[in-house]
Structure formats: C-alpha cells, structure tokens
Image (cartoon, helix red, strand yellow):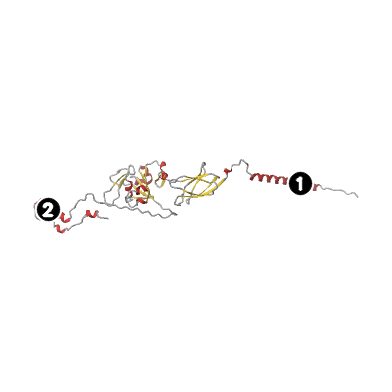
C-alpha cells in the first residue's frame, strides 16, 4: 500500500520562525559579549592620570588645634575646598596630583597625593605671614588689603619692657603716637594718637580688648597680649562711631589650646625707686612756730596766734605718698 506524507503549512511556518529567533539571539549574545569585553579593556594610549581619587584629611597647627577655613586646592587647577570647624576636608583630585594647603599667618605647604587617601596636615606659623595680618574692627585682614593707617606691635615686643602697664610698652614703637606720664603716682600713662583734639572732653583713645570696649587697660598684664593694632585715621569711626574720634587701640590676648599641654610662664621684675630731690617739709608744730614768728615780725606783737603744742607732729603726707610698698 502506498503511504502519503502530508505537511501542515502552519507547522512549517512555526519551524522557520523558531530558527530565525535562535539565529538572532545568538548574534545578539556575541555582540553583547564583545561590547562588554571592549568596555573594560583600556587602550594602549589611555591616560591613567585622569582617574579621580577622593582625598580626605585634617588640618591642624603645632599644638593640635584644628584650623577652620584653611584653603585646600589642587596645584595648577581651579579645584579647591576649605576646612570645616573641626579642620576636616574632602576633595576629588586627579590621581597623582599635589594639594596646596594655606592659611593666613601660616606657611604654605604642598602635599603629594600619590597613593594616599587620608592626609594629616600640620601648618607651621610664619613670622613673615603674621606681620601681614592686622585686626580691623571685628575681624582680621591682610595688611596689604587695608587702606587705612594701621600700626602693629607684637606682644613679645611689649613684654620686653619692664613695665606693669601695657601702654608704656608702646613708647617709641609707633609713629605718630605720643605717650606721656600722667604725673600722679600709680596713674596710667596718657596716650595721644591724633594729638590733642579737644580741650573740654577726653582725648583718650578707645581700647578694644578681644572685641570688648574699655576706657583703661591698666588691668591688663603685658605678658597676656598677643598683638596690639592702632587705628590712627578717621575710617575707624565707621566701625566704632564717635568713640573712635581719638583713635582705637585693638588688643588681642593670647589663647590656650584645647587639646594642648598646659604651659605656665613666670616673669619677675625687681626694681628700686627713690626720690631724686626730696624737699624737707615742716611738721604741724614747726609750721605753727613759724606762723607765730611771722606775726611777731609783721605786727611787733608778743602774743602767739596759735599754740604749737596743740597740733603735735601732724601727718607727713609726703612720706605717706612715697612710702615703701
């Protein structure tokens, strides 16, 4: 008997569609694998310095105190940041870059970042930089940026002079500032920054100690002073008002370190004072005797005006003022 083969049209189409899908899927897998491999393989001329690294760190001074606002920038570029209140910073830099760390009053440092992710920077105070920083009003500025007349005296220069009054330490150190003794025992010296501008009111300058106003600074220990800045022109009135008409003396005191070791300094001075020309004064009994003698010569009377014995020795005010301390 003859067998007849029958092929369904729908089955043929299904077979053809399946082969097409398998071929397409195979081509897609091959292309995707090739693309993935080429994405992770670097070409021979690839510049590895373009890789970005995250650098974190902390900036402190020699005593371990954090420096807030220190400038952190990548050398040769405009990329930069600054430290927070704890002295910490974080910056994205190209691998192998150099960080430039700077702050007003401290020497600038350049730190290589190759192979590093965390950097500890210790800035060292620079004498040359400190001389360029002045206190103006309620903040600080670089001296080159200040257009007004400002004179600066460092605390170590004031403490060299054996005096218990810090004003005496300014004697002969600031141009245009006149300092004279008041004349009264124990009185503070008089300072004139702009000369004698009035004959009625006070010609004393305004003293500002760490932002607090004072009329006199005789209570201040010269060894506690970090620096003194004298504002001599009229621009200071824009900050302090009419009180600054006679000039302003800005005083910054020394501050300790929170995490540093305690330091105790002792400064002692020994001196002897004596009167150059002491005038011998009469006591009360001697004065009464001279008064009777004067009356006798003038009137010819033999009667005493006063009884010298009734006054005794009296009080020697000369000796009381110049007594040994």
Q: Are marks 1 and 2 in contact (CB under 8 Å)?
A: no
Q: Secondary structure at mark 2?
A: helix
- Say which residue appears at 13% left-offset and 55% top-offset: 289
| Category of crowding for the residue at label 2, using alpha-carbon neighbours closer than 10 angstroms: few (below 14), some (14–19), many (at least 20) | some
Q: Left or right: 8 with respect to 131?
A: right
Q: Nearer the viewer, residue 66 or 48?
A: 48
Q: Closer to the N terminus: mark 1 or mark 2?
A: 1
Q: Position of residue 153 (x, y in %)?
A: 36, 46
Q: Quadrant of the C terminus?
A: bottom left
Classify residue 196 by image quadrant: top left
Q: Nearer the viewer, residue 285 or 95?
A: 95
Residue 52 lies, with reference to residue 292, above or below; the image says above
Q: Left or right: 97 with respect to 201?
A: right
- Say which residue appears at 70% left-offset and 45% top-offset: 30
**Residue with the mark numbered 2:** 293
- Say which residue appears at 17% left-offset and 56% top-offset: 284
- Mark 1 or 2, closer to the camera: 2
| Mark number displayed over residue 233 | none
Q: Position of residue 151 (x, y in %)?
A: 36, 43
Q: Position of residue 318 (x, y in %)?
A: 22, 53
| Category of crowding for the residue at label 1, using alpha-carbon neighbours closer than 10 angstroms: few (below 14), some (14–19), many (at least 20) | few
**Measured Cα–Cα span from mark 1 to mark 2:** 152 Å
Q: Secondary structure at mark 1?
A: helix
Tally the numbered discs: 2
**Residue with the mark numbered 1:** 19
Q: Position of residue 238 (x, y in %)?
A: 38, 44
């Amino acid at each position: 008997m003859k067998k007849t083969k029958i092929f369904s049209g729908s089955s043929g189409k299904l077979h053809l569609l399946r082969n097409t899908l398998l071929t397409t899927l195979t081509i897609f897998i091959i292309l995707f694998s090739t693309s993935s491999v080429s994405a992770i393989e670097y070409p021979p001329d690839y510049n590895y310095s373009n890789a970005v690294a995250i650098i974190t760190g902390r900036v402190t001074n020699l005593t371990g105190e954090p420096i807030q606002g220190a400038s952190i920038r990548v050398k040769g570029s405009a990329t930069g940041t600054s430290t927070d209140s704890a002295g910490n910073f974080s910056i994205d830099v190209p691998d192998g870059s150099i960080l430039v760390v700077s702050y007003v009053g401290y020497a600038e440092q350049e730190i290589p970042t190759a192979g590093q992710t965390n950097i500890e920077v210790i800035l060292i105070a620079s004498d040359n930089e400190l001389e360029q920083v002045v206190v103006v009003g309620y903040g600080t500025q670089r001296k080159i940026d200040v257009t007004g007349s400002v004179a600066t005296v460092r605390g170590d220069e004031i403490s060299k002079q054996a005096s218990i009054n810090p004003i005496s330490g300014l004697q002969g150190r600031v141009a245009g500032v006149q300092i004279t003794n008041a004349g009264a025992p124990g009185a503070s010296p008089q300072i004139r920054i702009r000369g004698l501008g009035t004959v009625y009111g006070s010609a004393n300058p305004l003293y500002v100690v760490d932002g607090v106003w004072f009329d006199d600074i005789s209570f201040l220990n010269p060894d506690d002073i970090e620096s003194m800045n004298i504002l001599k022109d009229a621009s200071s009135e824009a900050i302090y008002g009419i009180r600054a008409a006679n000039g302003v003396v800005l005083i910054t005191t020394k501050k300790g370190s929170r995490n540093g070791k305690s330091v105790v300094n002792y400064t002692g001075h020994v001196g002897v004072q004596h009167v150059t020309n002491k005038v011998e004064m009469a006591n009360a009994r001697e004065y009464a005797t001279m008064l009777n003698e004067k009356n006798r010569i003038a009137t010819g009377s033999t009667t005493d005006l006063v009884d010298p014995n009734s006054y005794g020795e009296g009080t020697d005010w000369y000796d009381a003022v110049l007594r040994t301390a």
